[in-house]
Structures are given as C-alpha cells and as structure tokens.
Amino acid sequence: MPTLLTRRLALLADEKHRAVLAGGLRGIERETLRVDRAGHLAHSPHPAAMGSALTHPQITTDYAETLLEFITPAEKDIADTIAKLDGIHRYAYSKLGDELLWSQSMPCQLPPEEQIEIAWYGSSNLGTLKHVYRRGLALRYGKAMQCIAGIHYNYSLDERLWRVLAENEVSGKRLSPRSFQSESYFAAIRNFRRYSWLLMYLFGASPVLSSGFLRGRAHKLETLSDDTLYLPYATSLRMSDLGYQNDAQSGLRPHENCLDSYVATMTKAVNQPYEPYAKLGTKRDGEWIQLNTNVLQIENEYYSTIRPKRVIQTGERPIQALCARGVQYIEVRCMDVDPFEPVGINVQTGRFLDAFLLFCALEESPTTTPEQGAVYADNFARTVKEGRRPGLTLRNGDNEVPLTVWGAELLERIRPVAELLDALRGDSVHRDALTAQAAKLQDASLTPSARVLEALKAHGNSFNAFALAQSEQHAAYFRSHAPSAEEAAHFDQLAAVSLAEQAEMEAAPQINFDDYVAAYRASNLCQSRACD
C-alpha cells in the first residue's frame, strides 16, 4: 500500500501541480562576530555606515554589540538567497575598516564579562526594550553565550501546495486551509525533531572552542592545546549543553502536536515566575536588568533548534502573530557556521536542506509523546557530542541502531523527494547533494567537524589561530570582490533610510519606559485550546 509520502510525491509530480512545488521561499540569517586583526573581540560600536541596527532590514546585531546579523530577502531558489548573502558580506566589508568577520560559530578568545558590550538600539522605547531584554540574557546565561553565532535557515512552501494536499487527503478530519497549513508545518517540525541528529552529523562544525569560553563552568572537554578544548568525536559543541542552555529552560518542552498546544506552552513560560530570577528582580540601582522574572522574558528567549514562524506586524509579538494568522514558515536554528565557506554556508548544503525539509513536511508524522521527545533529544545530544565515534548508536523505536546505518536509510527515503525537485529543475543538484552527504556517512573524515580538527593541526591545534586564519582568508575574498556601484548605492540607501527611521522613532513622543514595559507584559498573547 502506498505510504503518505509516496502518495503526496505522486500528486505533486502531476503536471498540473508542479507549479506549487516551485513556489515557497528560502531565507538565511547569518550571525558573525566583529574582531580585530589579532582575533580579539572588537570594542567599537555597530558601524553607523551600515545603518541602524534597530531598523535596517538586512544588517543588524543580535545579542552582543559586536555580533552582526545579516538577513537575506526571501527567495524562491537557495542559490539566489546565498548570492544575496554574499552581497551583504561584500558591502559590510566595505564599511568594516581593519576589522574582520569571525569565521566560526564559537567565539574568539573573549575579554572579561564587563568588557563585552550588549547590543544597543538607541533611546526609543522599542530600542531600549530590545537592549534590556539582552541585559536579561546576560544575567541569565552570561555574556559569553551572547557571542555564539549560527546560521538560521528560513523555509516555506507555497500556500497553494498545502491546499492541494488538503484537497487530496484520503482520510482525517477536515480543517480550514489556515489550520491545515499550520498543523502540516507542525508535522514537519515533529519529523525534524526525529531526524535532525542527521544534520548535526553532516554539517556540525564546532568540535572545538576557546579554553576561556566556559568561564570556569564544569565540563568534560579534553585539552587539545593551551588555548583549545574539544571532544574528539564531537560535531557541534555549540548545540550541546555547553551552548545556550540553563536550568530554567531545561524543563521547558513546548508541545508540538498542534499550534494551540505550542502557543499555550509558550504563553505559560513568559508568564510563569522563576524563583532564581525573582531573587534578582527587574531593576538594580534604578536600572532595568531584565524585562521580567519569568521563565522566559519573551517567547524568543526559548532556544530551540526549530521554530514555527509568522511575519509580525508593528507592535505584535511572535506568538500573537502565530495565533492570529497561523504558521507561515519554519526557522531551522541548529546549523553551525561553516568555517570553510566565506558566507558560512554553501549552495549544496542549501539544496540538501530543501530536500530534507520537504521530506519532513510530506512524510507521515505521528504526534509525539513526552517519552518519545526525550528520545529525540537524547539522539541529538549523542550526535553533537560524539557523532563521529565509530559504532555510535542511536535509539530508533525500541532498537539501538548504528548512526551511519540509520543515516544511510534516511537518505534513501529522502532520495525520491530530491528526484522530484530535480525533475522540476531539469538537473541533478539535489541528488548530487544527497550523494555528497552519503559519502560523509561512509567516511567521517569528510564531515566539517573532522575537517576542522584536521585543519587545526597546521595551526598548532589552536582554535583561535585556525579561526583567525580562516577569517583573514574570507576577508581577502570579500575585499577583492567589492560591491558594484549599483550594489553600494542600494545598501547606502537602506542604511540612510534605517537611520532616518530610528531618528524619527526617537524624536516622537514616548510614554515612560516603565509604563511601556508594563503594557508590553500585559499584552494578551493568545487564547488557545488543547489539541483535539
């Protein structure tokens, strides 16, 4: 009997439905630290020539003042997305002076906490809110955590595709188009949870870190050199419990069996007091130090490997947007920066992600019990800390199976999806991407994490020396490919408009900030119900 996946693939292969498969959008957010020529954290403010970090649509900062974030427009083809990302990098380098963009997910050798500046967004209430939120993050997680960088991959399917699938479902309850789309994205998220360990093996690129990063925290890492710690079989220490984790979030498990349940869990987390935070309070010496003393200050504080998303309107919170208009796209947040690629990711990786995510969206996706969720989390944790260990097994149902065997089986299940995408294009780029990943399962030395460890040998096994050399190499590439006059004018205009928008916001009458925060906290996030 045909599976749900094969039925859906056959449906989308039909000539009359192929156009909906060609729709959908891809966007990338790339984070990267600004460092000086010695590979130390830059202490300069966000370059004004790049525009306003508060209002610029493509160049902003994330947590630390020196952590740039480049945001591409959404494109139908990932090659176009990465070309846009390349353009943002080339423009940024034209405004950086002697500074470099750090080539790694894990940060450079960091100064003392008090010398790490939290991102500043100006004096408007909105800008101050964003800054105080980051003060809270520093309080809760430490400033070193605010210097970690990643690649976020935003992925959507054409809304017409969901309607085609809904109209041709052979069983199940009938949902409105909006509800069907939202629940289908949540089905994709559940499958992502089941199988995202594979992404960590194939693309994890942070098996080492600077010895000063942990700030005295207990750990089980090994010493590789005087300034470098590592785990010999790790793929992504960034995504391990050494990354953005803490006790408050450890028990937070948003239900992803339906939109309503997810919204209810997140709404509770931003309203539920947490005693250790309550002891700190929201102000110190009259200055705001965190927005509230709850498990989460805002819903975006939940550090998840994947999120359901909806473009927000002015004054709207992310959960409110989801509740009001449903899921519009998903944001994959577990991808490390590829230190061998100038923009941190290449097109072949994007092609694989497109096939992997479409597979997750089309494949059968049963609801998940808490016990199953714990197994998925454990598989992920094993892979990030020891994914290349020979003979490593993961839990698949009731069985322990070798990672490499299960990975190869998964690639074969994804192959028909890649073939359908290639048939649409008339080439073999998605199948080629699968072939490249299959080689990594057969030979772990081909993985980015293994390549990083091998490359470190030429730099005295020093993470900082290797990372600085890669940063300089990438800088040379971008500086030798300066933006054209047309590109420069485009970004100059974006910068000027963003600065004017921030100035206008700061000049407008504003209520007292305490009242502004009170109104923000009192905003009704959503009315939700339990899953059926």
Image (cartoon, grey):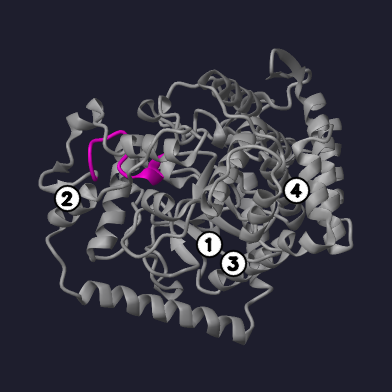
Between discs 2 and 3, the one toward the N terminus: 3
3 or 4: tag closer to the N-terminus: 3
Q: Are marks 3 and 1 in contact (CB under 8 Å)?
A: yes
Q: Amino acid at mark 1?
A: Phe
| Label 3 crowd (10 A; few <14 / some 14-19 / many >=20) | many
Task: Kindly report the distance in space between the C-alpha atoms of the residues bearing marks 2 and 3.
Answer: 38 Å
Q: Position of residue 149 (x, y in %)?
A: 52, 48
**Which portion, as a residue range, is magenta?**
291-302
Q: Is residue 45 left or right of residue 76?
A: left
Residue 8 image offset from top left, x and y in percent? 76, 46
- Numbered circle sitting on residue 355: 4
Amino acid type, callout 3: His
Q: Nearer the viewer, mark 2 or mark 3?
A: 2
What numbered label is drawn on residue 518? Answer: 2
| In this view, the mark in front (3 or 1) | 1
Quadrant location of the N terminus in the rendered image:
top right
Taking the spot 49% from the left edge, 81% from the top edge, the residue there is 492
Q: Which secondary structure lies at badge 3?
A: helix
Gap in angstroms between the C-alphas marked 3 and 4: 26 Å
Which secondary structure, mark 1? strand
* Front position in the image: 187 or 385: 187
Q: Where 284 sits versus 496, above or below?
A: above
Whether residue 58 is visible, yes or no, is yes
State yes or no: discs 3 and 4 in contact (Cβ < 8 Å): no
Query: Identity of the amino acid at label 2?
Result: Ala
- Residue at x-position 58% and y-position 45%: 185
Residue 370's place in the image compared with 77, above or below, is above
Residue topped by disc 1? 70
Q: Nearer the viewer, residue 298 or 469?
A: 298
Count neighbours of disc 2 (C-alpha within 10 A) and say few if under 14, some if 14 to 19, many if 20 or more. few
Identify the residue at horizontal 55%, vertical 74% (top origin): 94
